[in-house]
Image (cartoon, rainbow, N blue to C red):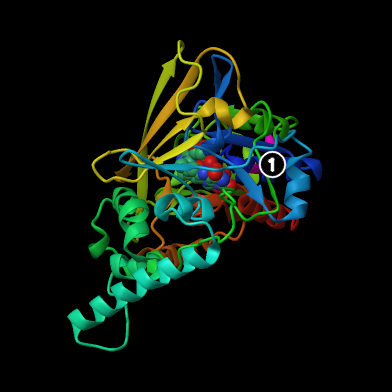
Amino acid sequence: MKYDYLIVGAGLFGAVFAHEAAAKGKSVLVIDKRDHIGGNIYTENRMGINVHKYGAHIFHTSDKEVWEYVNRFAEFNNYINSPVAVYGDELYNLPFNMNTFSKMWGIKTPDEARAIIKEQADKEIERINSEKGTDVFSPDNLEEQALSLAGRDIYEKLVKGYTEKQWGRDCKELPAFIIKRLPMRFIFDNNYFNDRFQGIPVGGYTALVEKLLENVTVKTGVNYYDFVKLQDNLPVRPFESVEGDSFDNLVFTGMIDEFFGYKLGTLEYRSLRFETEDLPDTDNFQGNAVVNYTERQIPYTRIIEHKHFEFGQGKGTIITREYPADWKKGDEPYYPMNDEKNNQLYQSYKDLAKDFPEIIFGGRLGQYKYYNMDQIIREALDMSAKI
Ligand code: FAD
């Protein structure tokens, strides 16, 4: 077969791009090395519950065009993400808002909350400055930065342990720039996101991606590196599969460093490990979809109870414990480590990619950037608009 496009990756980027290309009359083949479509937004239906297999995904956006676009492929429910944080025996609402402050200090008004945070933050700044023998506050690490923004109580109970688990390092060893600001709301509002539109696709994300790929040929369980004719790890032109299919263009949503055989070095990521438990005899395990565990001694960062994303009723529930993990080659690369060193390396790969103007590197792995789903759709729509 002769195709206009070979799209590597049936994740959200690949699916939106494929849909748009097909809508413009292009012939498209999508391949994915996993045995399913959807990439990381894949949901698997078990016990009547849509399980977010690669981590909890809540759709939120302020981009009206993107919101209207996804609503063409799925009906969204009115789920609002309102996580709860557990610290010892104490429970706090997130994000930091008047419910959190009122629980922490027994206060009622925004002025009282502001005064306590300011008093605690000023005290920490004074202490840090005096230890360093300076009058000008300049945080040397994440701990100093967070203490100067939120004070001791919020830092100790809600920031420290969680952040240390996420990064696998002590807050004193993490750079200050990771936390530029700690968003706080001085209203009673537990909605985690500030975006105008939010929800979960009724019936799960996989159904949404299926709809996007309705008129497209998809092959799962197919790895690009086995599928395409390569020489020195790079695709030979004109692009051809080992089976003799030919392609005018390539859209690649896998890892850009792997594409070039890691010849300039390896980009780094943080990974995650998921431990999922089916609880057929439990109706309601934790009363909320997302519960964060902010103490460092508890090895997981959060427990997801999937049925609550879709207001599930009835018997049985499924929970997933999420453990942050170091990443090594071969592990699932969840979060790009966008520090200076890695961004520079990515830039060098991007320069190499200029030798292949007929290849589009897209998505979170192709562009080495943490994108939310709405940003991925925006990118895929903008790039496919040039077809
Ligand atoms: P992916 O979904 O990774 O798709 C890439 C696909 O390419 C994969 O299926 C992979 O198997 C395939 N592939 C790679 N290499 C090859 C190869 N060699 N051959 C064949 N196929 C290959 N966003 C939100 O908006 N809200 C959230 O709440 C949210 N939560 C998240 C939670 C977690 C834990 C993570 C990690 C991300 C979260 N995101 C969230 C971000 C969201 O997952 C991404 O925006 C989106 O999934 C990226 O889509 P993508 O197509 O770029 O990548």
Left or right? Give the position of 344 relative to 199.
Answer: left
Left or right? Give the position of 146 relative to 19.
Answer: left
Point 35% across, 69% down: residue: 120
Point 55% across, 32% down: residue: 42
Q: Is residue 4 magenta?
A: yes
Q: Camera-side residue: 98 or 358?
A: 98
Q: Camera-side residue: 360 or 198?
A: 198
Point 35% across, 66% down: residue: 151
> Residue 259's x, y, as percent?
44, 50
> Residue 159's x, y, as percent?
36, 55
Q: Camera-side residue: 277 or 364?
A: 277
Observer able to see residue 117: yes
Please tell me whether residue 122 is drawn above or below residue 20 in the rendered image: below
Point 66% across, 52% down: residue: 61
Specify the quadrant that holds the N terminus: top right
Instruction: From the image, tell me which residue sits under label 1.
Output: 18
Left or right? Give the position of 67 relative to 272.
Answer: right
> Can you name the residue that lies furthest to the bottom here?
135
Specify the quadrant that holds the C terminus: bottom right
Please tell me whether residue 195 is drawn above or below residue 13 in the rendered image: below
Left or right? Give the position of 239 relative to 208.
Answer: left
> Residue 70's x, y, as percent?
73, 42
Please tell me whether residue 164 is drawn above or below residue 176 in the rendered image: above
> Residue 213's x, y, as percent?
70, 33
Amino acid bearing label 1: Ala
Give, as a single range, the part of the protein colored magenta. 1-6
Q: State whether the magenta stretch is mostly helix, strand or loop.
A: strand
| Number of marks | 1
Label 1 crowd bin: few (<14), some (14–19), many (20+), radius 10 Å: many
Q: Is residue 183 magenta?
A: no
Observer able to see residue 344: no
Residue 85 occupies quadrant? top left
